[in-house]
Amino acid sequence: MSQTTIDPRHLRPPPKRQIRLSWADERVRAIVWQVLIVGAVIGIVWWLVRNTQHNLEVRRIATGFGFLQREAGLPIGEHLIEYTPASTYLRALTVGVLNTLKVAVIGIVLATILGTLIGIARLSKNWLLSKIAAVYVEVIRDIPLLLQLLFWYTMLQGLPAPRQALNPVSGVFLSNRGLRLPFLDWQEAHSWALLAFVAGCFATWLTAKALRRKQMEDGRPRPLWPAAIGFIIGLPLLVWLAGGAPTAIDWPALRGFNFQGGFTISPEYFALLIGLTTYTAGFIAEIVRAGILAVAQGQWEAAQALGLRPGVVLRQVVLPQALRVIVPPMTSQYLNLTKNSSLAVAIGYQDIVSIANTTLNQTGQAIEGIAIIMAVYLTISLSISFFMNWYNNRIALVER
Amino acid sequence: MSEISLGTSIAGVPEAAPRQPPALTTGPVAWLRANLFSSWLNTALTLVLGYLIVRYAISFVDWAFVNAIWSVENNQTQACRALKASATPGACWAVVTEKHRFILFGTYPYEEHWRPALVCVLFTALYAVSAMRRFWRKELALIWIATLVVIGILMWGGILGLSYVPQERWGGLPITLILATFGLAFAFPLSILVALGRRSSMPAVRVLCVAYVELIRGVPLISLLFMASVMFPLFLPEGINIDKLLRAQVAITLFAGAYLAEVVRGGLQALPKGQYEAADALGLSYWYKTGFIILPQALRLVIPPLVNTFIGFFKDTSLVLIIGIFDLLTAGKTAVVEPAWQGFGVEVYLAISVIYFCYCFAMSRYSQNLEAELNRHRRR
């Protein structure tokens, strides 16, 4: 009597739908449609490929990536790795990729800082500050980036010649040849100190993890800062001292018509960096603002009611929730900045697009040139979205 | 009983000290106190910002209006150059006064400039009409077709007594508006198809749509424009040559289609599942379901982000500068190439910025208002 009754429906296998060869059957229709669409796409692609092959034959253009090993003969002003016009196209394109990364990475960092500041300023209780931030965001977002880049580049070119260079701070010169900064006379000890700094950051991170684990065991928080100071500041300092503590600084000085020494930021790079940073910061500001507004007022109040200090409230309660809203749109802004860095070609900064464009003009290898540009950007885009997805998953709400 | 307790409670209250009247909570003084001088920090911030604003505003007004030169005769720009080098620099708006026809209309024949001017007015009117909700009906499509035909006639001419103007001579603002409008008109239907395809139950269709969207979104628009300018001619059979403007238009359309498709997909996903199921339960076919139930609701949900995408897309048309198509920005850049006017780019770029800003700001305000209006029922 008290036996569990078994639902007879569970014993019966689900009814098997047989495929009827009829237009009325949804699955038959789906298959037919897909075959037709895929067929059409393949047909179009095949037609394009055949046209292209024919055109290439007529124009006597050899396909393939063999040209990469040939001598490029194109001068590149800024290169992070050794490069001369006698280097190969492959080397030139590598320089281009590095130049793109150089502007994209620094632009992302600066735009994030500036955008966050403006986003917070827009929420300020000070009417003047919030209005200034609002006007900035409105204006910067409603003007094409290319126009802004041209504007900045023209502004920089309108600066005085090196002889009358602006000298806002001693040792810093701003002229139409770019920005000159004093820089460390780079010694081996500096490289080792830099390495020690990176290692110190890593060690601090490991320590933080270990401390967190211990706190999980006995519930007592332990301070991280002694270890952090030791690893991040002390260790590089020791290495630097051990290396003989070189302090020589390379000061820029006017010789003839231009500056010698110091560290140069070219006007092209400078204009591109200013343009990308200020433009993207306008969008990031809105994202940050929306993210902070998305945290319910009750969360602030509840945290304060628990007696947490304002800094802790921000760090432990508000920010983790705001970041969840902020990170996904921020990812697309980072991607946009990277893709927008391709506008460098308009102001003569030699990024990958500019160098690939010159390459395809010199060699006539249009298809390969554009394929390289697309491959590079797809790789960068996918890497950024992969990293940001990983980060997003880390901070996402852990739902039980 | 109650009297006693009342008496004790009164006795317990100490003699009230004469108090200050409460602080004002309305009026300009209270507003200033609350918004600008609420604390020491805020007061300091207000004063510093106020000082900076006044200082820079004065030097900007000096530069842009007080010291500015508004026109010169016969391209004699010495006065402008002297002003630029002087201690009180000023803007040389003469370059804009002199070149405004060229910047706006490019190399279009001078005596026919009323035609592109009328075209710009028509485009703007078309946007304004499309923005008004009372015109959101089927007839709007007819208005669009009619206006675009009129615009084509005005630009090309060759009939109705208008002289023929070849496409190579078009330029300036009409090109920007043409690229944006036609790009949009073709990209929007494309994006709806792609968004539907991406949510389709047919795996092959889905894969194709995902590949298209992700590929286009992963690369910059410039690479597509380069592709249009150097690779499209290789793709086509010999003897068929499409015009450069049309090629750029195709690239822009493909680009916008991918971005719009993602927005439309957002709307399709946001629609409650019950709507799909109800339509299925009524036995509607896929296209009836999509056309009469799903799309009208899904598109309405995403109008604000759609408008934002349009704004981005309007700005992106300026990238055709890089492949040498004569849009507004290219015309401006070319205007200062002439030796007499070299070095006055800042003024020209500011003037062009104002034009772009007017269009984009109008769209962005419109999208904000529309969002507020469409969300009104939700706030209740």
Image: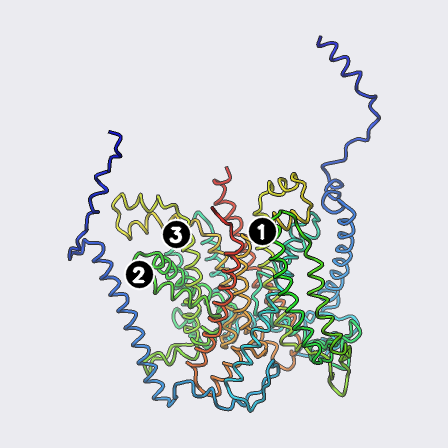
Q: Is residue B378 above or below residue A93?
A: above
Q: Measure the C-alpha gap from mark 1 to mark 3.
A: 30 Å
Q: Nearer the viewer, mark 2 or mark 3?
A: 2
Answer few, some or many: residues within 10 Å of disc 2's Cα (few below 14, many 20 plus, some between 14 and 19): some
Q: Measure the C-alpha gap from mark 1 to mark 2.
A: 38 Å
Residue B203, which numbered label? Answer: 2
Report in which chain the residue with disc 3 lies: B
- The amino acid type, in three-letter code, at marker 3 is Leu
Q: Earlier in the sequence, mark 2 or mark 3?
A: 2
Check if mark 1's residue and mark 3's residue have beta carbons within 8 Å: no
Residue beneath disc 3? B268
Can you say which quadrant of the picture contains the N terminus of chain A?
A: top left
Q: Measure the C-alpha gap from mark 2 to mark 3.
A: 18 Å
Q: Is residue A78 above or below residue B116?
A: below
Residue A320, which numbered label? Answer: 1
Q: Is residue B18 above or below residue B197?
A: above
Report in which chain the residue with disc 1 lies: A
Point 34% across, 81% down: residue: A52
